[in-house]
Structures are given as C-alpha cells and as structure tokens.
Amino acid sequence: MSKVFVNIGLSLDGYLAPEGMTMDNPGYKNWGAKWGAMMAWIINQQYFRQNLLKLGPGGETGPVNDLIRSTAERIGANIMGKRMFDQGEVAWPEEAPFHTPVYVLTREKREPWVRPGGTTFYFINDGPERALELARASAGSRDIRIAGGADVIQQYLNLGVVDEMEIALAPVLFGGGRRLFENLGESGPQFRIDRVLDGPAATHLRYVRQ
C-alpha cells in the first residue's frame, strides 16, 4: 500500500509559516523575507529549478538535490488545505509545481481545476478521510504527500495515518506564525529518526512511524 508522508520546511522555532503570510499583504512583519530565508536551501537545487520551477538548466547537484528528486518521484497525489491553495493559486506559475492530482480540503464547492503538466486540483468538502481515500485511489503504488498547511498536517497526524515525516529544519527564527505541532492528541503516532542529512542551509530530517 502507498505511504502517507509529510514533506515541509520548518523554522528553528517550530513554525511552518510566518505570521501574516498572505499574498495580499506582502509587507506584513516582513514575512516574505522570513519565508525566503527558511526555503533558501531549495531554490538553487538543480532538480527543483529544472523540473518544478521550469527555469532551464543549471543549479546545484549533490545529496540535497538527490533528496529532492527522490521525494518528488515518489509522490502520486498531494493533499493540502484551502489556505495553502488560496496563496498558491495567485503565486504558482501556469504549470503548477505538483504534476499529480491535488486534493484541497475546503468548504467551497468548485469544479476541478486542470493545469498544464499533469496537475489537477480537486476540491473536497467531505473531510480529510475522504480526501485521503481519493488520493490513495489516484496515487496507485506511489505515495501521498500531505503538503500543508499546519492545520491539515495536524488533522492527519490525529487520524494516525501519517507514516513518515520529512522536515527541512532551517536555522531561521520566525518568532510567531503557524506552528506545526499544535492541537495534537495524546494518542498520536510515535516516530523514530530514520535519516539526518546536513546541508549548508538546512538539516534534513526523516522520521518513520514506529
């Protein structure tokens, strides 16, 4: 059976997103610079630039680049929340950087949104379990990524269905924002450290469920 995994960047003080991170308020508490600093590790990696951003040849190679490639190649479907989708809808290029079905948890009723390059957004009104059911069906033998935001990740952790977590921990302090590990039940899954990869701008941690 395909695995369910979380794959995100995280600030050193535990925030997935800085306070006030919305595309319609770009100057609020300098959130853009904070976000850019947290995600700086990925921007110049060859696989990310060529295959996800479509910027053409060039970029860094090495263990971090190989990690990005292996993560991208295992994904058969993505799940995200409405907040993350709303910000991305106005910021992603026409060829959105997923290339899989994407299931958006929302109360909004909307027809599927088909983008070039294999990405189709489906808007799910029936809760996280239904989104996961659909994602499993479309992913086949590949895995399902819980892309974010924090509240969506917390929902799937509380459901006990997350098999792995991949966290790029950046040496950046936000001082506020949306924490990753909040609102969790005491009976959630337990994890063990599977891999640690040191990069120049982030430490890449992989946890697997015990």
Image (cartoon, helix red, strand yellow):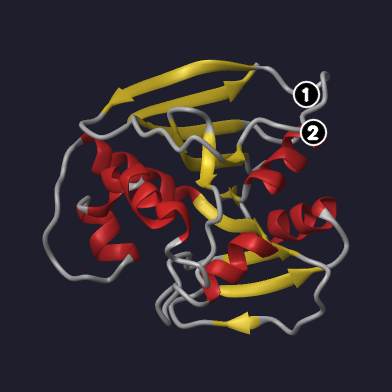
Separation of residues labelled 2 and 1 (CA atoms):
6 Å
The tag earlier along the polypeptide, 2 or 1, is: 2
- Tell me where residue 127 sits by quadrant: bottom right
The N terminus: image quadrant: top right
Q: Pointer 1: what residue? A: 188
Name the residue at 70% across, 53% down: 136
The local secondary structure at tag 1 comes to loop
- Tell me where residue 159 sits by quadrant: top right
Name the residue at 22% across, 50% down: 45
Circles 2 and 1: CB atoms closer than 8 Å: yes
Q: Pointer 2: what residue? A: 158
Residue 122 placed where, x, y %?
70, 72
169 or 130: which is nearer to us?
A: 169
Q: Is residue 13 above or below residue 74?
A: above
Q: Is residue 135 above or below residue 150?
A: below
**Tag 1: amino acid:** Gly
Residue 2 placed where, x, y %?
63, 43
152 or 164: which is nearer to us?
A: 152
Label 1 neighbour load within 10 Å: few <14, some 14-19, many 20+ = some
**Tag 2: amino acid:** Asn
Number of callouts: 2
- Tell me where residue 180 sits by quadrant: top right
The C terminus: image quadrant: top right
The local secondary structure at tag 2 comes to helix
